Image: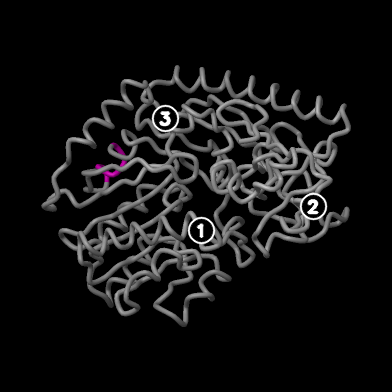
Amino acid sequence: MNKKFLNLGMQPLANSFLKSNSKKSLAKEFSYNLEVSFNTDSYLVSVTNPVNPKLQYTDKYAHRASESKTMRESFKKIANKLKKKYSPNIVMEIGSNDGVFIRNFPKNKILAVEPCKNLANLTKNKYKTFPNFWNKKLANHIFSKSKKADVIFSANTISHIPDLKETFDAIEYSLSDNGVLVIEDPSIYAVIKNNSYDQFYDEHVYVFSAIAIDNIVKQSNLRLFNVEQLTTHGGSMRYYICKDLAKHKINKKTKLILKKEKKAKLDQLFTYLEFSKRVKKSKQKLIQIFKKLKNKNKNIISYGATYKSSTIFNYCKIGKKFINYVTDTTLNKQGKFTPGQHIPIISPQKGMNERVDYAFLGAWNFKKEILKKEKKFIMRGGKFITHVPSPKIISK
């Protein structure tokens, strides 16, 4: 049974950057009420009423995974690890984006699934790319003409798909007998620990725990046998899953993580109700920081036009009253306006100038990378604002 525990108010699509802030453009902007629920049977944490994926994953999708050095290095590392450990003949990626992971494999071994046409067009002439949503119909189409996959990889995608049962059924059909599914997604354990409620937005239909994954894959004749904790995206988990009768044995580390999550009471509603209380306090404290700085006539910008920051800005009602503009390295976002609050987006080269006193860390999960890059800003007295794990001002 689903129990609502968090209401983040009316939210736009986190990826819907506006080309114009005219009245006509603003009138067309889609919004929905972002509520989050906990299922007391499966232990899944999910958006209560998911948005139609066809509204989200369009030919205007802005995110390019390869534009982050951190992500390029992370995906290359896991690709090399999977090649060495499993020597796959066929590798498929669900949600291949601009190919940052899958391009590390030989072209003749690659199958890529990417529903956003603009992203699929980037790779369709390099290797076999299917510009479709992942489901049983697509799995039948692909594997009626191909050998089954030895490795299926999916990063920050499975948690975006509303129908998990069909998703995992289709994966079970597509795997070779001893094939391995490897998925990476944000961890609810990290969200609770860091109070990072901005991990909830329209694309994150689910934020998984290991115990929830362990439960849900069993319904599709799959099983969890390995788990790795990651630092990417502010705290993620990498799950290794196989068919019921595959040779892979569950390791000791996975058993310990499942115990750890139960000890943290991630299988109990009470945990999420307490988390909700902390979220409300975090909101109040963050707004107070912005108000105090503005009362002192400080110039504030935001660093990173991230999907996560969209949740923060719209839940806390932090708009142009507090923030002059947002900087972002993604060319496709520059010259546009943030969803909901309609703050202009410019390049860091233009934005990180001497007039800036404070920068809100919209991309807080890249904190180390940003602080290293912006040493000049810090040396001249510039400071950053973060809300994780609690709102505060930082300079190192």
Q: In the structure shown, which secondary structural element does the residue marked by tag 2 occupy?
A: loop
Indicate the amino acid at tag 3: Asn
CA–CA distance in space, label 2 to label 3 = 38 Å
Q: Is residue 347 left or right of residue 239?
A: right
Q: Are marks 2 and 3 in contact (CB under 8 Å)?
A: no
- Marked residue nearer the N-terminal end (2 or 3): 3
Identify the residue at horizontal 45%, vertical 68% (top origin): 99
Give the residue at mark 3. Answer: 39
- Mark 2 is on which residue type? Pro
Q: Looking at the image, which residue is at 31% across and 60% down?
A: 152
Above or below: residue 284 compared with residue 198: above
In space, the residues marked 3 and 1 are separated at their CA atoms by 36 Å
Q: Residues within 10 Å of mark 3 (few under 14, many from 20)?
A: some
Q: Work out how far the residue at label 2 is from the one at label 1, CA to CA, in angstroms.
A: 24 Å
Residue receiving disc 2:
344
Identified by mark 1, the residue type is Lys
Image quadrant in which you'd find residue 265? top left
Left or right relative to 379: residue 70: left
Residue receiving disc 1? 69
Residue 317 locus on image (x, y percent): 76, 34
On-image quarter of the N terminus: top left
Q: Is residue 13 visible?
A: no
Q: Is residue 216 magenta?
A: yes
| Disc 2: CA contacts within 10 A as few (<14), some (14-19) or many (>=20) | many
Residue 37 location (% of width, % of height): 50, 30
What main secondary structure does the magenta stretch of the protein show? helix
Viewer-nearest of discs 2 and 1: 1
Mark 2 or mark 3, which is nearer to you? 2
The percent position of residue 39, horizontal first and vertical second, equals 42, 30
